[in-house]
Amino acid sequence: MTAFELNEDLKERCILLGATKAVTTHFKNGFPLLPEPFWETVIVLPYNMHKKYLRVVFSLVKEYMEEFEEYGYNCADPVLEFSYGEPRIVYAIFPGQKSFTKKLKK
């Protein structure tokens, strides 16, 4: 399994738990405050999702971030934010010198 596939697995699980959309964007050159390349994922949840289920999805994302870190990837802490009237979970993975598309090794 690759880091990309692991991230896709996380997004699929979030969709199964009720997320309406999960989109990953690769920032090849980063941006001024974060100059290194990284992958950012936004998981959009329904505006009327019960907070208990928001916590379940958020906990799942945190568990996956711990797994990414076990494989040597740096991860920003996931953030639950409310944008455009919808809750969104946003997280970023910083691969550094590691590949996001090659088989994972601990």
Image (cartoon, rainbow, N blue to C red):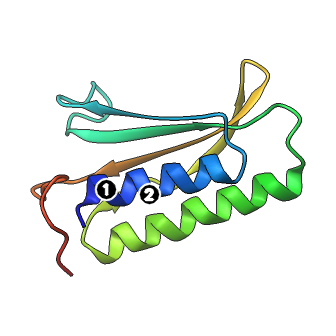
Mark linked to residue 17? none
Q: Quadrant of residue 87?
A: top right
Residue at x 21%, y 81% (from the top left corner): 106
Element at badge 2? helix
- The quarter of the image holding the N terminus is bottom left
Q: Is residue 9 left or right of residue 35?
A: right
Residue furthest front as drawn: 16
Q: Nearer the viewer, residue 37 or 41?
A: 41
Q: Amino acid at mark 2?
A: Asp
Marks 2 and 1, how far apart in space?
A: 6 Å
Residue 83 in the image: above or below residue 70: above
Q: Amino acid at mark 1?
A: Glu
Crowding at dot 1, Cα within 10 Å, few <14 / some 14-19 / many 20+, comes out as some
Query: Residue 2 location, x and y as percent?
Result: 23, 61
Q: How many marks?
A: 2
Residue 79 in the image: above or below residue 9: above
Q: Quadrant of residue 70?
A: bottom left
Query: Residue 69 location, x and y as percent?
Result: 35, 70
Q: Nearer the viewer, residue 75 or 55?
A: 55
Query: Residue 94 location, x and y as percent?
Result: 28, 51
Element at badge 1? helix
- Kindly identify which residue carries mark 1: 5
Mark linked to residue 9? 2
Residue 22 in the image: above or below residue 11: above
Residue 71 in the image: above or below residue 9: below
Residue at x 66%, y 34% (from the top left corner): 20
Q: Are marks 2 and 1 in contact (CB under 8 Å)?
A: yes
